[in-house]
Image (cartoon, grey):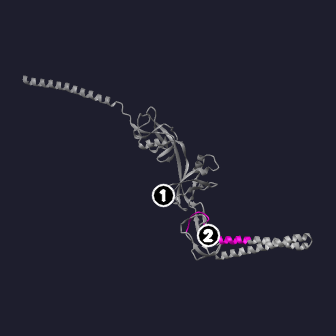
Amino acid sequence: MTKGSRFVKGRAVLLGTVGLILLAGGVGVVLDRGVGVPAQAQAPAQAPRVGVQTLTPRQVQVWSSFSGRLRAVDLAEIRPEVGGRLTEVRFRDGQTVAVGDVLFVIDPAPYEAAMAKAEASLTSARTNAAFARTELNRAVSLVKTQTIAQRLYDERANANRLAQAAVLVAEAEVKRARIDLDHTRVKAPIAGRVSRAEITVGNVVQPGAGAPLLTSIVSNDGLYADFEVDEQTYMSGIRARGPSRDQENRIPVQITAQGDEAHPYGGTIHSFDNRIDSATGTIRARALLANEDGALMPGMFVSVKVASGGGAGALMVQERAIGNDQSKKFVYVVGEDAKVAYREVDLGARVEGERIVLSGLRAGERVIVDGLQQVRPTMTVEIKEAGLETASRALAAK
């Protein structure tokens, strides 16, 4: 090996040694920087922001819905009470009539003649009665002086009694003739909406069991809604009104016609039946409502909402805050220390996107309604406004 080659080899070894030293230093730098990365990741994470609903007692009304049918409070079938030819129809089909309005006229001529005859008979009877009274008074004076026989006096007394009775009979005949004459003008016995005329002018009608139907009238200022209520709704409605002999009359109802849900009619329960149907577990009920605009009609199918619970002091929680844990319902509550707590709840009826809280929560507690996917029990959170809907509900409750 020459001197030049030994020099080159020694230089290469020196450079390799220096490279190893530098590489070791570089690795040390990289390792030192790598150790610093976990130190930065261990910095405390920011608490998630959540929206809450603060529970406040509110006035709530729970409704149970049923199907029913409207019926008229008053229904009158108009039939003739005297016979004769129909001469007038004084209403339009579907017209609203008042009590006493004349609907039909039956030819009054025969009854006017009967009335005149009865009045003439009454005049004759009264004349005979006056003469009989005079004869009796004369007989009283004569019998005292024994001018006439007792038997003659008795005959005149009897004639007087018969004459007075004849007057009573004649008066009754006049009264009957007047009634028959009045019945030739067929009048509305109730106020309401009249149906169409089933018999037209010129036809002869007769009274009695087979009398034809002339028309009918239904009252329309007030209507009944007949429906069936389950036992639970019946009991909760009665209990909510407190002990009273007429407690059903204070249970409110809301009634809407099919296709007209935007215009509910208010009313109250009029009556419950006297027993529960054991086959269906329901009780027949009847509500009374005012039909002020006259839009509703008997026979309509309607939806009947019955107040079956609620009242003042109810706590409500938004449905979006409720979670499901198998068969259980739960919510997350934020405590005074801003930590999340799991709370199992018992819930009641649904009212406008919220549920009544039966147990598990107290007034003033804060329930998480926004950001639920970010939280777990014992986690610390930051509270924010839950949104316009929650804020408006909270203001409405105050």
Other residues around mark 1 within 10 Å, as few (<14) / some (14–19) / many (≥20): few
Identity of the residue drawn at 13% across and 26% down:
12
Q: Tell me, yes or no, whether the two marked residues, 2 and 1, touch with CB atoms within 8 Å.
A: no
Residue 124, numbered label = none
Residue 186, numbered label = 2
From the image, which quarter does the N terminus lie in? top left
In the picture, measured across the screen, residue 44 lies left or right of residue 156, that is left
Give the percent coordinates (x, y) of residue 172: 73, 70
Q: Quadrant of residue 31?
A: top left
Please report whichever mark, 2 or 1, sits nearer to the chain's N-terminal start: 2
User: Relative to 199, does residue 397 appear above or below in the rendering?
Assistant: above
Find the magenta span and give its range: 171-195
Hey, what amino acid is under mark 2?
Val
Identity of the residue drawn at 17% across and 26% down:
19
Residue 322 visible in the current orientation = no
User: Relative to 117, does residue 343 appear above or below in the rendering?
Assistant: above
Give the percent coordinates (x, y) of residue 137: 85, 70
Q: Which residue is mark 1?
A: 260
Q: State the SS at label 1.
A: loop
Give the percent coordinates (x, y) of residue 295: 51, 60
